[in-house]
Image: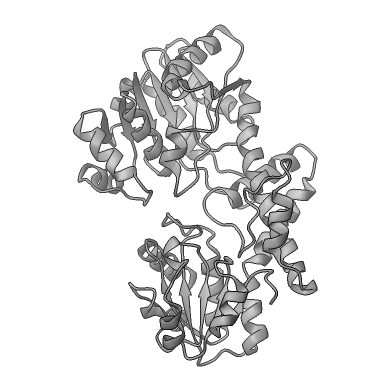
Amino acid sequence: MKVTIIGSGYVGLVTGACLAEQGNNVFCLDLDPRKIEILNSGGVPIYEPGLKEMIDRNRAAGRLQFSTDIAASVAHGDVQFIAVGTPPDEDGSADLQYVVAAARNIGLYASTPKVIVDKSTVPVGTADKVSAAIKEELEKRGQPADLCSVVSNPEFLKEGAAVEDFMRPDRIVIGTENTPAGLRAKEQMRKLYAPFNRHHERTYYMDVKSAELTKYAANAMLATRISFMNELANLADLVGADIEAVRQGIGSDSRIGYGFLYSGTGYGGSCFPKDVSALSKTAREHGRDLKILDAVEAVNELQKYILVEKIEKRFGKDLKGMKFALWGLAFKPNTDDMREAPSRVIIQELVKRGASVVAHDPVAMPEAQHCLELDFKGNPEGLKRVSMVDNPMAALDACDALVIVTEWKAFRSPDFDQVMQKLTRPIVFDGRNLYEPSAMRELGIEYYGIGRHN
């Protein structure tokens, strides 16, 4: 099938590459010429395991192309995926200006029937806005108003495992309307996703609004589990319990399961913070407060400060002249995404108290440098106290303690003798509970985890 992907960001690139891998002819559009230049020169503007190899393979096979040509992109695809950004607006709602602009461009150039797929994470009712924008442009040109039909097909991709998630999905959610045009669109989507359903049927068909809400509901549930466990971990610290034992005890219940029950420094990234806020905003627009989600957000913001609180408790509030090694900058491993990353809060708070920070991340340091320059805008002296090194052990040299923020595999089994030798004091603040407290004590390391008998 001929497919157009509008937006060559994280979701768009993964969607386009994976659909091309199944033999479709895919045209990826982006209005950022720098991004398209990177892609056409063999680069990839984001880090995602396996993505570059898949893009290279399908570009070489002639199934994948990148362009800024809007008219060509609309002419190409019988199915048009809208995968543009929906950043949070000032009031917490999703900013739909890029989605609506993409819809208008389709209406400006479409001359044959198209299935329009909302792939971006959008609030309930967005498909109606997309449909209205397309129809308005079609009618201006004298084209039939029903030339294009809009469906909802939300993404469920985990950063760091997005290619695998797309190729072997838990579920495929498709929302269509029960109209002749909607039924035709449903059949087109069935054909497009047929290769992903060969082992067993993974597709759930529903109405458009239910599909739109499903995406937000999924992320809100996962965010709730994370904040819930962080609340329990903080209580475990106070009462002397071990949150890891608690996690195993409740996770063994089949009604609960083990997924997303790990305590830490709070969630970040491009999805959970934005989607929880947008869902709460949608509820308020309909006269209802989602009190649980408001609490989830509040807990998560406080949790980003938990390691700083532990450091303060150990060293005092004045950290002037102290130096901390920090392992992990990205909000999670296997990505370079720094959006809402807890590391940004931790670094700013340590610097605010007079400390300096030497950081290492296997992938995210270039993006982190850009983000920290924004965070410290107006405070150049503070930024000077933050440095980055290419080796995790080099970050430890003459530091007063190690702070672990992201659970990269490379950090799970370090040479602890070397760690102790390089640090001025053998102290570890582990924001991801990578190590066993008893093992650390045996080594002579002063260890502070999250809810682990501190």
Residue 94 x %, y %: 58, 43
Q: Is residue 317 visible?
A: no
Residue 253 lies in what quarter of the image? top right
Q: Is residue 350 visible?
A: yes
Quadrant location, the C terminus? bottom right
- Residue 362 lies, with reference to residue 199, above or below; the image says below
User: How is colour applied across the structure in the image?
Assistant: one colour
- Residue 320 lies, with reference to residue 339, above or below; the image says below
Left or right: where does residue 231 sit relative to residue 18? Answer: right
Which residue is pictured at 55% across the width and 65% down the height?
342
Which residue is pictured at 32% across the width and 23% down the height?
24
Residue 61 lies in what quarter of the image? top left
- Residue 95 lies, with reference to residue 337, above or below; the image says above
Which residue is pictured at 60% across the width and 81% down the height?
441
Left or right: where does residue 375 sit relative to residue 300? Answer: left
- Please count the marks in the image: 0
Left or right: where does residue 113 sit relative to residue 237? Answer: left
Q: Nearer the viewer, residue 428 or 90?
A: 428
Residue 157 x %, y %: 49, 41
Q: Nearer the viewer, residue 369 or 307?
A: 307
Residue 440 x %, y %: 57, 78
Residue 141 lies in what quarter of the image? top left
Which residue is pictured at 48% across the width and 12% down the height?
187
